[in-house]
Image (cartoon, rainbow, N blue to C red):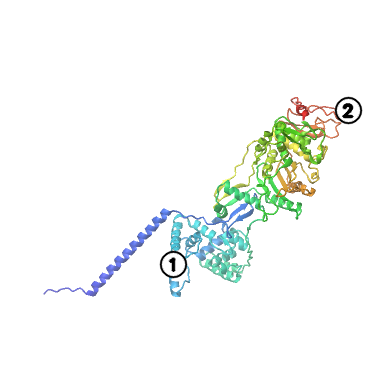
Amino acid sequence: MVVETMTNPRIQKGKKYFRFLFFGILFITAGLVLFALAVYIYAKILGPPPLAVPQSTLYYSNDGSIIGESNSGQKRYWVPLRSVSKEIVNATISIEDKNFYHHHGFDIKRIGGALLADAIAMHKVQGASTITQQYAKNLFLTMDKTWTRKISEALYTIRLEMNYSKDKILEGYLNTINYGHGAYGIQAASQYYFGKDADQLDLAEAAMLVGIPKGPSIYSPINSLEKAKNRQLLVLNSMKENGYITEKDVKSAAQEKITIVGKHAYHRSELAPYFQDIVRHQLKTALGLSDRTIQLGGLRVYTTLDTKQQQIADDVIKESIAEDSDIQVGFTAMDPKTGFVTALVGGRNYDESPYDRAVQASRQPGSTIKPLLYYAALEKGFTPTTMMRSEPTTFQFDNGNAKYTPHNFNDQYADGEITMAQALALSDNVYAVKTHLFLGENTLVRTAKDFGITTKMAKVPSLALGTSGVHVIDMVGAYSMLANGGKKADPVFITRVEDYQGNVLYEYKPQNEQVLRPDLAYVMTQMMTGMFDKKLNGYASVTGSTIINQLTRQYAGKSGSTNTDSWMIGFTPQLTAGVWTGYDKGNEITLAADKRYAKTIWARFMEKSLKGEPIKTFKAPKGVVSLPIDPKSGKVATKDCPISREMYFVKGTEPNEYCDLHPGKGEKRLPKQKEKPKQDGWLHKLFNWL
């Protein structure tokens, strides 16, 4: 008998469903694998995501202190992970993502737990974002809830994990998270809440700070100390459960009394706002950085500013000029050896007028141009004892079609011959114009350019008296060239620029270009000390007589004035400073007190800035000799001369005639010289016709 086996229809149906389920799962798995592979390949193609986020640019003085910052209302200061206390790191990982070092951007177990908790509660009660996911979110800096953003964040998370180390991701997270009150990043938060850097926080402070990002407006100790303390305890217990601290540590930290500062470390600095404007301008024009990079690039800009000197300049200007006066000021100080600008004031009130009168304004320098003229004369064979007549003189030029009659101050003249040294000390205008015309009007134009003057010089007789406008900063640079022995002294404001990660974008390289002859620069410098030496008094007092009693060391300098401008520029071997005062609209300076502001400011600044510094004298280079000179005759002084001043000459140009204005029995003997000195009377004869 044949027995026919009958298949149970229910078994057949079950097998069919099993096969369908199996292949379905296999298909879904394959799809997921392919999708994951595609995402991986796509992420690989995209490469590392950019980590740049807006960061405050900080400006540093020459001693490393911060003088200002730029930001968009948010305080952001990037610090490397090594500059963050271990308590912050441990607390952050413990409360935010305890498996951070063990997952690849997504904590699947945590996500599952969060989904289950949310399903039970029927609303979102538990988050599952890892530190990497939160960092990815911070990099977008927008808070929209679109699916596009979520997908992008997930892709960012994958790319972060693929291309950066865990420490680098943690560093980025700590530097971008919102801690409330405009503080973004651990450094800004540490400074705001506790007034200290992120590497100085103890356990109690770290636990409180790490608890804030959960809800900055809720858990900020500024807003609610009670809620902040409760959140702090939660963080401490989390750290204990994860093995970072002990129960004893929890109790100690929870009981610690914490001082809350509640103040941002850096505000828009009131110190050197004009200086900072110049620095920002140079970052853009000289370094080629964009406005956004300068404003939000997290740059570290190291400048030449000396905060002590800047404060002295600000204080001296404020105390020297009458509060109700409309007189304005332009001021610059510079280290002559390096060209580093150490202090700068562009006006009396930046908020009222950000126009920079030290750098932007072009004003007539008056007699402060004369040292440049007389340096050119030294090049052409003049010496400090070259004699010319000081008397009312009318000059004809342009083939006799034009006349020019310069006047001395108060119409005082020697009505006889004076030396170039005395002409400079007394600021004799007739002597200056004679020299200018003899050299040729092009000579001073070329010389001014050699000295770094950037404004246009007019080829006219009055140029010798400073009738072509100049910038204060250019004149300070020009005088610095004399102070440093003739080397180029372009003003320097920035020494180094770093990006937010510490990469050097720019670093200043010292210049050492010799422009002037060192021997002539020294002779000119010594002549410029004459404005403070009463031995050179003649038909008038030396121009520095009103401030001589305020000075405690040797200075070289020159004052200058026009109807609308008042100047004083001077230097020691270690510091040059220049002051202009006047009215913005070019009104005439009529009050005697207003005319003294420039000298007063300069003297007070130099004395206060150099107080406690070594008293340095100008060192003579090779090829320079000195002789005692009778200021009136310009000849070598004898024992019978009532006044004798040491003057300096390029060797071979010194006078060899004795003073014969004071007959007596004094021995007339010149210091021994290797070479016989030459006569310098030819210029005096040449000018007899003038």
Query: Looking at this view, is 689 or 124 the one in front?
Result: 689
In which image quadrant can residue 467 be found? top right
Where residue 239 appears, x then y in whole percent? 53, 66
Q: Which residue is mark 1?
A: 111
Where residue 172 appears, x then y in whole percent? 52, 58
Asked if 343 appears above or below 94 in the picture, the reply is above
Task: Indicate left or right for 420 with 202 as reference.
Answer: right
Q: Residue at x 41, y 54 (%)?
A: 44
Label 2 – label 1 distance at C-alpha: 110 Å
Residue 622 in sight in this render: no
Query: Looking at this view, is 332 or 606 the one in front?
Result: 332
Asked if 690 appears above or below 74 in the picture, the reply is above
Query: Looking at this view, is 570 or 109 the one in front?
Result: 570
Task: Indicate left or right for 666 with 9 as reference.
Answer: right
In the image, which disc is placed on residue 585?
none
The single residue placed furthest to the top in the displayed view is 676
Q: Amino acid at mark 2?
A: Lys
